[in-house]
Amino acid sequence: MNKILYILFFICVLAGSFNISNAEVITGRVDEYATNNNNKIIDSKTKNALSNAKISIPELNYTTYSDENGVFKLNVDIKDKTVLFVEHDGYKVFSLTVDNNVLKNPLKLGIEKSNPFDLQISSGIIHLGDNMFSTNSANSSDFRLTAKGESYNQTFKMPALSPSSDVVVKIGTIIGLDTKKAKEAGQNRIHSAYSSPMTVKVNGIKIGTVELNGDNIELIVPKNILNETNELTITTGQNLFQTQYVDYDDCELANIRIETKEKRFWAKK
Ligand SMILES: [Ca+2]
């Protein structure tokens, strides 16, 4: 996991302060959080509260902003997994898979200052597939966007890199993959079928596959395949148990970025 960009699910005791022992005591008192009004946005490094951050759940048409203490309310009813975004000037777009279970406790979200070499490829939600999916899929009753087909393509220009940096494709959030691993991990309720993994290519060369849903998925791009202008292609898998026709795995991607990381940092993880 990226240790800088992290999420703390915590139990809020008093605004701005908490400790583990108090948190444990209060865990069972769910009624205290029914309105879920103590969510907070902080700078992941300084831990300072961030005001006026935009928090949105696009599929529910919900948008709100953090107040002067970084606090925000989420008065939403989420039926299935969906994507929450946090945006703030000077910070990387942050995305997180949320459902009603996640929202039972206040969220404390640490967001990270943007790096001038990072490229935001897409900030919204992209639905890949063919709009045919089971309601037992790891995706969802909350899927509302029309599928853009089986692949997402985007060209990007790569800034000059220092020899000590690595380049990664980062997918902020993926929901809906119905691969064998997703099924084994209990991410869906489909018993009889699964799909091949999602593949990620740069300039036509496969750099990796994605088999599990989640947040902050990173794939290293070999630097020798990068040019000044490049093409990123993300293709969803196919249902391996449907032989009559091609059934693409319907899924949602959010917050796709190209990031550069110093190798010194990267190697320690
Ligand atoms: Ca499908």
Image (cartoon, grey):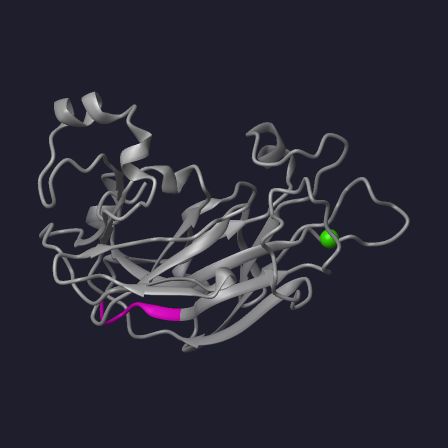
User: The magenta stretch spans which residues?
Assistant: 115-120
Image quadrant where one finds the N terminus:
top left
Q: At 54% across and 49% down in the image, what residue appears?
A: 175
Q: Is 92 on the left-hand or right-hand side of 184?
A: left
x and y percentages locating residue 32 in the rendered image: 27, 35
x and y percentages locating residue 144 in the rendered image: 61, 61
Q: Is 248 on the left-hand or right-hand side of 156?
A: right
x and y percentages locating residue 204 in the rendered image: 59, 65
| Main secondary-structure element of the magenta-colored stretch | loop
Vertical side of 130 occupied by 24: above or below: above
Near-viewer residue (155 or 207):
155
Q: Is 27 on the left-hand or right-hand side of 44?
A: right
x and y percentages locating residue 172 in the rendered image: 41, 55
Q: At 9% across and 45% down in the image, what residue appears?
A: 16
Residue 98 seen in render? yes
In this rendering, the count of numbered labels is 0
Q: At 29% across and 38% down in the image, what residue appears?
A: 33
Q: At 9% across and 54% down in the image, what residue appears?
A: 48
Near-viewer residue (77 or 253):
77
Near-viewer residue (133 or 152):
133
